[in-house]
């Protein structure tokens, strides 16, 4: 919730409170030097335009109440009162601090309660009673910004307009719910006026689940454009399989690295990091593993895959077994070469480091999702002279791979690797769609920069921020 | 099982399952209605259940591999023996005494006084590895390595009081390196990544990329 009053009264109130406190701080005992003039609010002004409506774009069970801020919230008296309350809240809470603040701002309003909003919901009495009662479901100070309280049955929503929003949650869908709102100051209370009242000051609405979240429309439009682009280039790749794709050094080195390993007669290690099967870098890595396993089978190499996640291990076992079988080398496949190590990050790093030191593989692939163990693994690989081809989509780990590995697949190259190694037209077609997508994005960014910098127009910025 | 039913079970069914579950997850991003959100939560629950069962496969793999090495007395079989004994002891203590930190159970002691210090030791090694990696990277062999060296020195100096003592503009230069060229490169990588992830997801969803099933097209 947000106070939308002009800043001037707030500043004035803050200055006044600041001056009062400064004076008060200088006189711990004795009377305050400044007695601020009496600024009591004699009469509360009613908030207006109270409405109730189903909360849009949610899973149901929620109604949003909204009303225009009370004119009382925009008076200097209100801001002074709120500023004093804030000073009290921000103090260290000790009785001495409170006494100092109250003494410094001697005035009738210093001891008065804050202005609050009270929200009521009509409830039907359980049988055998009949009739309804108004239950107070929320109380909160006016003019204060609130964060969303997801665990609360009620929810405050921040707004930039001149209205307050309040979402009531955990309601029964399909049933009419009635509400009213009061502005309260001590004994004074005034009811919000409703735009379309069912009774004076009372609004009602029905909550229901929604089929679309309107705020995600720009995202949906972006997804539709990218899906269209990808499908278009997949279709084109089917018609025209010969497509130019830029060279990626790390992937061109795979063949040579595997041949070197075959000549050296040493195993190849394939490490997929600490991702789960639901992580996209792990999925990309599994796709590359299939191509590497085929090459290992062709060259008669042992391919060892130490796994961090049992699900990944299970998938990797199937992938390697199928790849050896597809190359007609099913008998060369050693099932236990794809194995589970541990699900503890540094235990995994220690274990794989030990294996690398003992087996001294000719080639090591570090492709997938890596965190702090990236350097621990890559540095040991470098120290034993293994040819290392590394890649991840975690930007923070890329510098470690760049400095330690012989070749690094940076970010998107990890996802391009499967298509690059297989040379399948359909997969290559998707690479072209990514390049066109990137060109589009660059165009949008440039347009946004020009609009914002030259024409002072920021709608594109706001649209993308959604 | 004949060829067509094998193909159905090993290829078509997984691709179909992947398509349906992927579609549910995508739809749940835009549709808050319980008709979509319900299946989405079910898919998530199944992911957790399958992961729990998979740990049994993982343990079986671990035991089989290390037991085979111990039995064959391969090179380094002692490490495998230590692994098996440690696993057995931890499992027995955990099952027998429980895992309540408040009760001071033995497994908590193992975690606090063995596992945690060993993990911290491994993590602490990173600093030495960073030093050796930095030494290799900072050797001035090319224009790129020189740029890396200069920007690395500027950032390191800007982080510490000595940088300000050398020249007042060093911390500002550090901030510029981090917020302009570094941020630009990172955002470029992130944008490319986003598009690649999108295309990869779509390929998997449509069954174009199915090497994760152990089958190329």
Image: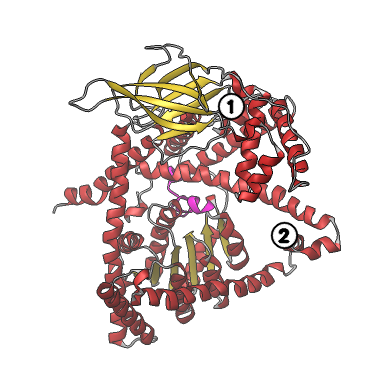
Question: Looking at the picture, does residue A66 appear above or below residue A31?
Answer: above
Question: Looking at the picture, does residue A48 appear above or below residue B23?
Answer: above
Question: Looking at the picture, does residue B103 appear above or below residue B151?
Answer: below
x, y percentage for residue A190?
Answer: 50, 19
Q: Is residue A440 left or right of residue A205?
A: right
| Residue labelled with disc 2 | B144
Q: Is residue A418 magenta?
A: yes
Q: Secondary structure at mark 2?
A: helix
In which quadrant of the rendered view does residue A194 lie? top left
Residue at the limit of the structure toward the front, as seen here:
A30
In the picture, the quarter occupied by the N terminus of chain B is bottom left
- How many labels were placed on the picture? 2
Q: Is residue B86 left or right of residue A1?
A: left
Q: Secondary structure at mark 1?
A: loop
In which quadrant of the rendered view does residue B54 lie? bottom left
x, y percentage for residue A163?
Answer: 54, 22
Q: Residues within 10 Å of mark 2 (few under 14, many from 20)?
A: few
Provide the residue span drawn in magenta. A413-428
Near-viewer residue (A193 or A443): A193
Q: Residues within 10 Å of mark 1 (few under 14, many from 20)?
A: few
The image's mark for residue A52 is: none
| Residue labelled with disc 1 | A160
Q: Chain of mark 2?
A: B
């Amino acid at each position: 919730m947000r106070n939308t009053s002009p800043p001037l009264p707030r500043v004035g109130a803050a200055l006044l409170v600041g001056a009062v406190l400064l004076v008060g701080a200088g006189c711990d005992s004795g009377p305050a030097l400044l007695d601020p003039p009496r600024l009591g609010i004699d009469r509360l002004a009613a908030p207006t335009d109270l409405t109730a409506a189903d909360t849009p774009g949610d899973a149901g069970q929620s109604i949003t109440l909204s009303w225009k801020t009370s004119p009382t919230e925009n008076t200097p008296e209100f801001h002074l009162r709120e500023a004093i309350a804030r000073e009290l809240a921000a103090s260290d809470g000790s009785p001495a601090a409170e006494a100092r603040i109250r003494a410094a701002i001697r005035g009738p309003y210093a001891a008065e309660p804050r202005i609050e909003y009270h929200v009521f919901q009509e409830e039907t009495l359980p049988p055998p009673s009949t009739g309804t009662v108004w239950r107070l479901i929320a109380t909160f100070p006016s003019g204060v910004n609130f964060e969303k309280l997801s665990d609360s049955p009620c929810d405050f929503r921040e707004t930039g307009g001149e209205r307050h929003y309040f979402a009531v949650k955990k309601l029964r869908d399909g049933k009419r719910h009635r509400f009213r709102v009061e502005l309260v100051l001590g004994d004074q209370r005034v009811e919000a006026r409703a735009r379309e009242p069912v009774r004076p000051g009372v609004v009602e609405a029905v909550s229901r689940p929604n089929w679309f979240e309107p705020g995600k429309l720009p995202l949906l439009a972006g997804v539709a454009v990218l899906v269209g682009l990808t499908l278009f280039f997949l279709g084109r790749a089917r018609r025209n399989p010969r497509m130019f794709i830029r060279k990626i050094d790390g992937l061109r080195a795979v063949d040579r690295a595997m041949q070197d390993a075959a000549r050296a007669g040493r195993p190849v290690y394939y490490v997929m990091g600490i991702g789960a099967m639901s992580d996209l870098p792990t999925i990309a890595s599994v796709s590359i593993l299939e191509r590497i396993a085929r090459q290992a089978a062709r060259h008669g190499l042992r391919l060892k895959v130490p796994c961090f996640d049992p699900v990944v291990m299970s998938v990797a076992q199937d992938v390697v077994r199928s790849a050896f079988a597809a190359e007609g080398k099913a008998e060369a496949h050693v099932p236990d070469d794809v194995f589970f190590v541990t699900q503890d990050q540094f235990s995994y790093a220690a274990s794989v480091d030990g294996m690398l030191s003992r087996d001294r593989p000719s080639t090591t692939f570090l492709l997938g999702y890596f965190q702090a163990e990236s350097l621990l693994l890559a540095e040991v690989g470098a120290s034993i002279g293994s040819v290392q081809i590394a890649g991840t989509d975690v930007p923070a780990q890329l510098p470690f791979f760049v400095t330690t590995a012989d070749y690094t697949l940076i970010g998107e190259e990890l996802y391009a690797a499967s298509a690059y190694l297989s040379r399948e037209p359909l997969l290559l077609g998707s690479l072209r769609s990514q390049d066109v997508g990137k060109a589009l994005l660059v165009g949008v960014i440039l347009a946004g920069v020009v609009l914002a910098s030259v024409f002072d127009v920021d709608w594109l910025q706001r649209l993308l921020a959604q | 099982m004949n060829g067509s039913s094998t193909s159905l079970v090993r290829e078509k069914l997984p691709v179909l399952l992947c398509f349906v579950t992927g579609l549910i997850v995508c739809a749940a991003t835009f549709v808050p209605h319980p008709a979509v959100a319900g299946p989405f939560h079910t898919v998530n629950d199944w992911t957790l259940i399958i992961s729990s069962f998979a740990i049994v496969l993982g343990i079986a793999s671990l035991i089989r591999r290390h037991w085979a090495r111990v039995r064959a007395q391969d090179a380094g079989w002692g490490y495998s023996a230590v692994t098996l004994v440690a696993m057995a002891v931890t499992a027995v203590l955990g099952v027998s005494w429980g895992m309540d930190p408040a009760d001071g159970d033995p497994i908590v002691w193992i975690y606090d006084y063995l596992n945690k210090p060993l993990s911290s030791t491994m993590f602490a090694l990173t600093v030495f590895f960073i030093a050796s990696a930095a030494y290799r990277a900072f050797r001035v062999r090319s224009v790129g390595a020189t740029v890396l060296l200069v920007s690395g020195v500027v950032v390191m100096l800007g982080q510490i009081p000595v940088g300000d003592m050398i020249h007042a503009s060093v911390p500002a230069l550090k901030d510029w390196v981090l917020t302009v060229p570094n941020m630009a490169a990172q955002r470029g990588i992130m944008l490319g990544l986003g598009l690649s992830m999108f295309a990869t997801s779509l390929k998997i969803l449509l069954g174009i990329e199915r090497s994760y099933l152990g089958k190329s097209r």
